[in-house]
Amino acid sequence: MRQIIIIGSGPAGYTAAIYAARANLKPLLIASSVEAGGELMNTTEVENFPGFPDGVQGPELMTKMQEQAERFGTEVVYDDVESLDLTGAVKSITLGSGETHEALSVVFATGSAYRKLGLTDEERLSGRGVSWCATCDGFFFKGKTIAVVGGGDSAMEEATFLTRFAEKVYVIHRKSELRASKIMQERAFANEKIEFIWNSEVVGITGDEAVDGLTLRDTVSGTETSLPLGGVFIAIGNDPRTHLIHGQLDLTAEGTIAVAGRSSKTSKTGVFAAGDVIDSSYRQAVTAAGSGCAAALDAEHYLSTLPQDLLATAGDTELATATN
Amino acid sequence: MTARAVTEANFDQEVINNKKTVLVDFWAEWCGPCRAVSPILDQIASENSDKLDIVKLNVDDHPALAAKYQITSIPAMKVFQKGEVVKTVIGAKPKPALEADLADYLA
């Protein structure tokens, strides 16, 4: 048995791991089999993470966070959580491999997942011109006319990035102004290849074998128009990834995991949550990291209140050999 | 066992005229999800070497084949039987999910 298991490998998960490892709690971090490193693995330049005046590539930042967590004794497992039981003093977590791990405390930092438009043809045409990842798929749209749906920072980043490949990039937004930060907006406005389509909602994606256009509805007049294009990138936000704990932890009205005040304490004793999965307002790499720190400190405090005999069962027995 | 790399030059021989069922992993160096799914495909390849050949095609080096198979999102995993695409799986997935998608070809 462990003292602490951290689920998630984004900035929240790794920061929790750095703090927990430095507190000598020998954390096990479950990183996911195919999404290790979290959302920043699919971004390019990160310009707003403090300490990097020249910016840093998202994947590089995550590799460094992992190295820092491992340096102090975090053990990282590349697998996915299948199920978990958070009742009782000893929490148990079963992985895709079938292995079960037990711990006295758990930090839940599973982040969020891309939101879908919810259109019937979206799934059918996914990978056939519908994409959620500009850095993965932009390359295939050389010389084409494409669209990005959304008005936040990630939509602006994707649109700007995609102009490296595409002939023209429409940004389709439901409102008449953007949610994105000023610097990202200005960069997109200054880009000659980007054209904004305001007050418009995507109500249909068309194409037999591949995307050939969108059906847009004007949110003011209600009129529908079709826009021919060769691909569409969806960047309309994220939803907290909570499916594993439905029925076990209380959620907020926004669908995030409910925590007590400014702490990371969930509705179950010994279970803490951090990062995008508890945050419906900021969702930045640096706020996630701060929240991961809080979760590790809360967990550390909780562990210090447990009876010695229980703590003794979470000794060094399962400390794996360092994987160098 | 690591999935073999195929090229434009040996694609016909390795994939189209292969008597076995072949999964082609269309990938690129700069694609994070491709790097994540690659070891999982290697595992599936070694556990099912009697039923399925798994090969990788670098889309940067072989854009004509990527265009021919209308790749617009990677990783794209296409299953070929008798030279025809019989199944396409898009995106990196955990091993159990990928095995479920490929169940017909692993049985």
Image (cartoon, rainbow, N blue to C red):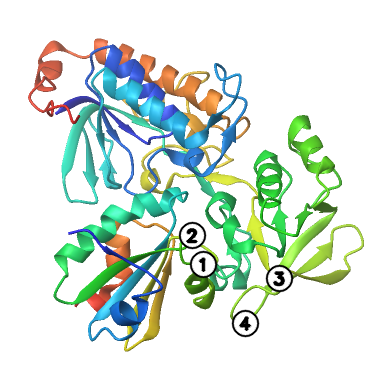
In the picture, the quarter occupied by the N terminus of chain A is top left
| Residue projecting furthest to the bottom | B82
Residue reaching furthest to the left: A317
**Residue under disc 2 on the same chain as residue under disc 3:** no
Packing grade of label 1 (10 A; few <14, some 14-19, many >=20) is some
Residue, disc 3: A204
* Residue at screen point 51% across, 35% down: A58
Provide residue A129's location: percent of width, then percent of height. Answer: 61, 67
Residue at image point 77% right, 60% down: A201
**Residue at image location 55% in from the left, 41% down from the top:** A43
- Amino acid carrying label 2: it is Asp
Q: Mark 3 or 4, which is nearer the eye?
A: 4
- x 62%, y 27%: residue: A47
**Between A34 and A316, which is closer to the camera in this rendering?**
A34
Dot 4: what SS? loop
Q: Which residue is mark 4?
A: A208
* Residue closest to the far right: A221
- Label 1 – label 2 distance at C-alpha: 6 Å
Element at label 3 = strand
What is the distance, in whole Å, between disc 1 and disc 4 at their CAs?
Answer: 23 Å
Mark pair 1, 3: CA separation: 30 Å
Q: Amino acid at mark 3?
A: Gly
For marks 3 and 4, give the CA distance. 13 Å
- CA gap, disc 2 to disc 3? 32 Å
User: In the drawing, what numbered circle is on residue B63?
Assistant: 1
Name the residue that disc number 2 marks: B60
Circle 4 crowding by C-alpha within 10 Å: few under 14, some 14–19, many from 20: few
Q: Is residue A79 left or right of residue A274?
A: left
Nearer the observer, A155 or A163: A163
